[in-house]
Amino acid sequence: MIPHLTTALSGPLLEIEHQFLAHQPAIERWFRHWFTEHMPPFYASTDLRNAGFKLAPVDLNLFPGGFNNLAEPFTPLAVQALQVAIERVCPEARQFLLIPENHTRNRFYLSNVFHLQRLLRLAGVEVRVGSLLPEITEPTPFETPAGTLVLEPIVRRGNRVGLADFDPCAILLNNDLSAGIPAILAEPLEQIVIPPPQAGWHRRRKSHHAACYAQVANEFAEAFALDPWYFTPAYRTVGGVDFRHKQGVEALADAASDLFAEIRREYAARGITETPFLVMKADAGTYGMGVMVVKDPVELRELSRRDRNKMARVKEGLEVTQVIVQEGVPTFERVDGAAAEPVVYFIDHYVVGGFYRVHTERGPDDNLNAPGMHFTPLTFARPCSVPDFTAAPDAEPNRFYAYGVVARLALAAATREIESLNESHSDVAATPLATAR
Amino acid sequence: MIPHLTTALSGPLLEIEHQFLAHQPAIERWFRHWFTEHMPPFYASTDLRNAGFKLAPVDLNLFPGGFNNLAEPFTPLAVQALQVAIERVCPEARQFLLIPENHTRNRFYLSNVFHLQRLLRLAGVEVRVGSLLPEITEPTPFETPAGTLVLEPIVRRGNRVGLADFDPCAILLNNDLSAGIPAILAEPLEQIVIPPPQAGWHRRRKSHHAACYAQVANEFAEAFALDPWYFTPAYRTVGGVDFRHKQGVEALADAASDLFAEIRREYAARGITETPFLVMKADAGTYGMGVMVVKDPVELRELSRRDRNKMARVKEGLEVTQVIVQEGVPTFERVDGAAAEPVVYFIDHYVVGGFYRVHTERGPDDNLNAPGMHFTPLTFARPCSVPDFTAAPDAEPNRFYAYGVVARLALAAATREIESLNESHSDVAATPLATAR
């Protein structure tokens, strides 16, 4: 059940972890206070990269799709946290309609939905699964590795959404709404929709999350006199890009050069000898699509047709016009010799488990969220909430505690992000997305 | 990690368990609703007896003293629940003063305090331990099986209680206040005291809890069309008893006869061939003191001097004047061949773990909370919150789910009990303690 962390970690990060442990009760209080002031998402997941010299979240998902990868021992923790989350959003909840992605050919994704339905049921809610797919015209069973999942056609009656014989009190989205809010879910709706539809990828931007994260990480660092660099990836946002017609590529390369220079400066200031790299991502991309690793800005001026095509469109065939270029954080973690990155799962503001995303054919500088990846659900020895004070800071439970801290900073950033998406009724371009440095 | 349940359970209880499982989401909702309306205790534990034909709580402790007996895998669950509990009572909490019992010679009890302090610290609170013992005049280390526990002298400054260099925002009692509220904790106090001091054994009465339990169990049974008898122990309360001077003994024997008759009637109605027995308990007793098993009312008329002495005084040397005579529920559970009863632990309204109390020299009809008992912390395979729908009702996870349901009914009863203790400012005799049947 324990991953092989072959890295001999030393230097600044150990110091950061040491600081996390020294401040542990105060850090927990900081988060307690944060999540009293800011409504946590119902659920979320975050991808971390641990470089030894830097530990940072590189993505935060508000529609997590890997509940099937959580180890069985995490189940009670997830059920308890779901009970808290349900009490918070809708204490009288009896029935949830769960709306998944349309990936009916992905058995792993269906297995995720099966597990999520099971967890919600264990938490005491009757749950049925409504599909947005037009071809689902009657209850249709799908076999998953975990059991049979039944998808049913969603029915709208006036301002209520449900199934033919099911009138739920809440709608839980496990669909990231990349293509926008479907007509069947359009406002006004009498039922609560979780997460709020405006937090879907049709409005979310990675750069907006990154800006919120940088703010939150700074506030956290200030509270504990830490250097936020050790857990904050630098980034630039570039708009007006058209990969097919090679427009905006110069601006992109300039932004990348600028970011490379910043990373080199910061590395030098801290005695880090690693070679910097960047990760370019479609700003509204998800499911690992529209992601490219950049080792030199020159590559951006000379993108192959294949790479341009890859970057041009993301999920649901949407055109990419804005990208985020993010400081690459190499992963020094290995599971059975392969590059691995931890994924931390939340329900409400509780860490309820995690797993490693492992890719045997990719290196420490690569995007691991790519075809060929697999998941090792059992490698978290313990949930991140339990540090071991008697062990050295690099002992495994404490590394997991540090993961839990940094992951929760990403979750805290998501609360601020969602608040500003809720406040803003104007177009995306007018939201604080433009806070790129 | 799995206990040997040698009982071949069949008949009514399986039916009850089946019903629990069939109603599971609705039952969870029932409890969710209950604990939205009624403030759950910060922590609690309850002793269950499973007779195969009857599964019932026989005691509820608001100052649980066995955190050292919880298996390590329960730690994350306990920490998460503590975070919920802390947010509920005092979200800005930084520092807790924990006040334990004065049992400094009981290393197991000290180990409980050590574990509790550790759990609270993991949940993000700074905790120090203040002792009511006059001989603790400076910070004093005590060795426990788990580590060193430091007891410090409590200091009162005006209306605040703390330590010489520690001004906590909340006081957590792990002392059941059998002897009353000590002067140093007398009102008015600026800090919140958890649980409320009026819930100490100086005011609590087992018969009051039993009355609240009977009410709650009836309401629950009505909601799901169940027969409450299968999870409610019958009882009688007898006051004006003086064991040393053999006063009130006739009334006691009469009450016992009456209760025996009731049990025989109920057994006969349900085809149960077991021989009934009773358990007589001091109404304000705790720590297993002042408890006696009664097989025949005649025994009560012919109590030996030894038994009378045993019943006459409880913890802190207090005189017993009122007793509860409770329907005995035999335990059909065995761990390694010895009689065992499950103890379920709560934090807030969450089941966070449990263990078996085992006594190798006692039988299924005996009080197991007696010298010579031991605890097997690992025998709960899973927390009670996770039933397995795919398994038969008598599969182990489901048995544990049934334990979780019945245990939570006892917790729900405790909320009602505490509410009425809070409301009542008059003497104990005037409180609803007199609701005995």
Image: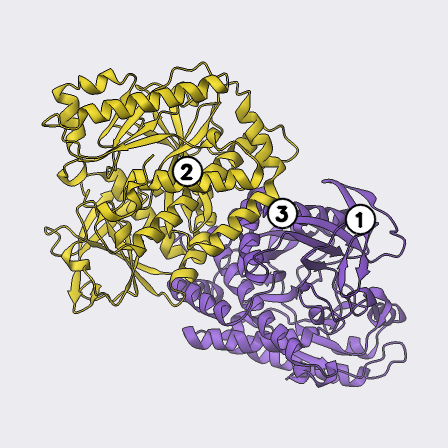
Chain colours: A purple, B yellow
Q: Amino acid at mark 2?
A: Ala
- Toward the viewer: A280 or B156? B156
Residue placed under numbered mark 1 in the picture: A151
Circle 2 crowding by C-alpha within 10 Å: few under 14, some 14–19, many from 20:
many
Q: Front-most of B269 and A41?
A: B269
Query: Are tags 1 and 3 found on a single chain?
Result: yes
Marks counted in the figure total 3
Residue identified by numbered label 3: A119
Query: What type is the residue that disc 1 sits on?
Result: Leu
| Separation of marks 2 and 3 at Cα, in angstroms | 32 Å
Residue B287, located in which quarter of the rendered image? top left
Q: In screen coordinates, is B370 left or right of B338? A: left
Q: Residues within 10 Å of mark 1 (few under 14, many from 20)?
A: many
Q: Nearer the viewer, mark 2 or mark 3?
A: 2
Residue A70 image offset from top left, x and y in percent: 62, 48
Report in which chain the residue with disc 1 lies. A
**Of tags 2 and 1, which is closer to the observer?**
2
Q: How far is the residue under mark 1 from the one under mark 3? A: 17 Å
Q: Quadrant of the N terminus of chain A?
A: top right
Which percent across, then down, holds residue B259?
34, 24
The kind of secondary structure element at disc 3 is helix
Residue A202: x percent and y percent?
76, 72
Res A398 visible: no
Q: Residue at the spot x=35%, y=31% of the render?
A: B375
Asked if labels 2 and 3 share a chain, the reply is no
Does the CB distance between marks 2 and 1 fall below 8 Å? no
Residue A76 can be seen in this image: yes
Please tell me whether residue B229 is drawn above or below residue A195 in the rendered image: above
Residue under label 2, please give it.
B214
Same chain assignment for discs 2 and 1: no
> Residue drawn at (57%, 36%), measured in percent from left and top?
B225
The chain under label 2 reads: B
